[in-house]
Image (spheres, rainbow, N blue to C red):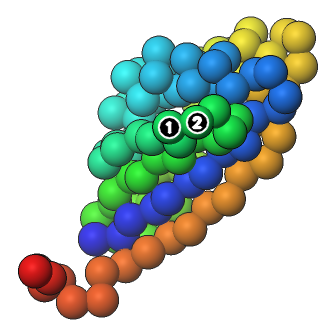
Amino acid sequence: MVYEIRVYEAVEGRADAMRRRFVGEVAKKFFPRHGIELVGAFKAPEEDGKFTYMTRFASEDARKAAWASFAADADWVAVKKASEVDGPLMKAQTISVLSPVIAGLLLG
């Protein structure tokens, strides 16, 4: 398995809109369509304009294929364009790709 953590930083004043688009469109419609398994989505207890989520894939090849398919999805392109009519929602993103060190290891 391959895990990915993405941290999105919103444009000033656009954090709620960015999160709403993710929850209302991306996670519900596009992730399942493209084989992207959402493990969890998070925000800080105090508003910091960031949104963090974790996804899981069977392999690195599956991860790359899923994101390529997502980016090329005409429906996604239309949703993104419509949601950014007043400008972009995201200012920056950080992507970390992780593989388990020891599968099945439980630390107590």
**Quick check: 104 above or below 45?**
below
Cα separation, mark 1 vs mark 2, equals: 4 Å
At x 83% / y 40%, what residue is drawn? 91
Q: Is residue 13 visible?
A: yes
Residue 45 numbered mark, or none: 1
Query: Which picture quadrant has residue 33?
Result: top left
> x, y (%) of residue 39?
31, 48
* Amino acid under disc 2: Glu
Answer with left or right where residue 7 lies relative to residue 53.
right
Foreground pick, 16 / 46: 46
At x 89% / y 19%, what residue is drawn? 87
Helix, strand or loop at label 1? It is loop
Quadrant showing the C terminus: bottom left
> Can you name the residue that lies furthest to the front here?
46
Query: Which picture quadrant has residue 81?
Result: top right
Residue behind mark 2: 46
> x, y (%) of residue 45?
50, 37
Answer with left or right where residue 84 lies relative to residue 67.
right
Q: Answer yes or no: do the residues labelled 1 and 2 have beta carbons within 8 Å?
A: yes
